[in-house]
Amino acid sequence: MAKYSVHEIWQEHYEYFLIPLGVICFWGLWEALAACYEPYLLPSPGEVWTRFQEFGGAQLIKHFQVTTKEALFGFGIAVIVAFPLGYLLAHYPILEKCLTPYIVGFQAIPILALAPLLVVWFGFGNFSKVLVAALVAFFPILTNTVLGFHTTSLALKELLSIMGAKRRQIFWKLEIPGALPVLLGGLKLGITLSVIGAVVGEFAGASVGLGYLVNAARGSFDTPLIFVALFSLSVLGIAFYLSVTLLEYLVIPWKRDQS
């Protein structure tokens, strides 16, 4: 049975040790800084945990579920619109030149300025928050879709056409596999940004959700509750990101074999 030294184990699996080490360092730094400030400015980890217990897990889950649904539906709309549009832009240069200035100009509008307008138009319900989440996630998904399909080798496309491959076969056998790494990179960014979009929409007007919780806690100077909501948003973003990472692991076996 082979024996490994501590140094060899660290070299092979150092990433598994860095995560808990980072958590411990962050916790210690937070405790040290919290000792220098009043609780209403920077509460300690213990005070945040106490506030979480006082607030109640059931109430937090209700807000968590609402923001999760808004972000997921917004992300879904962004994918449904951005993917076919990106494919068209990548294959028709004239269309890309015509639409790109408008898409970029619309993206340049701050979402903080646009969210209140969407709430006025579509009301204080979940739909306006879903739209904000979709708008935030749309541009990175669209950009990566166009970039991904642009990376497809023209020589290989011509070769497959000469060999009698149909357009559908070229799409599924060449274009999609070649664009997948870039496409999934856009999905990772988009699904993370959709959480931000949902929260911005809740800031503009809502009665439930993690963004509403932050607003309500800020109004009452309940800083520990703000931290509870922020950590919940962090958990949601990490869960979304890891979900797309798992999808990437499953659908790109050749990339997995290279790592």
Image (cartoon, rainbow, N blue to C red):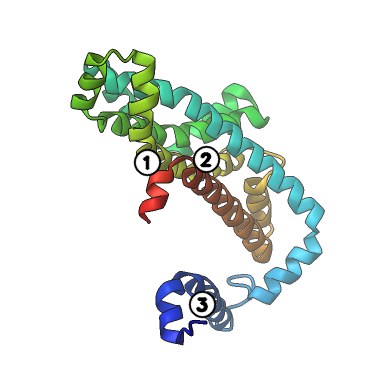
Give the numbered dot on residue 143. none
Which label lies toward us, 1 or 2?
1
Please tell me which of labels 3 and 1 falls first in the chain: 3
Secondary element at tag 1: helix
Q: Residue at x 40, y 39 (%)?
A: 186
Q: Residue at x 48, y 47 (%)?
A: 249
**With respect to residue 190, does 145 lie above or below?**
above
Q: From the top left corner, tell me how far across and down residue 138 is, in percent.
A: 44, 32
Q: Residue at x 74, y 53 (%)?
A: 60
The residue furthest front is 1
Q: Is residue 193 left or right of residue 130?
A: left
**Count of labels shown?**
3
Q: From the top left corner, tell me how far across and down residue 65 is, in percent.
A: 71, 43
The residue furthest left is 155
Residue of label 3: 21
Where on the picture, by quarter, is residue 180? Answer: top left
Secondary element at tag 3: helix
Which label lies toward us, 3 or 1?
1
Q: From the top left corner, tell me how far across and down residue 90 is, in percent.
A: 28, 23
Which label lies toward us, 2 or 3?
3
Give the numbered dot on residue 181. 1
Q: Amino acid at mark 1?
A: Pro
Is residue 215 among the parts visible in the rendering? yes
Residue of label 2: 194
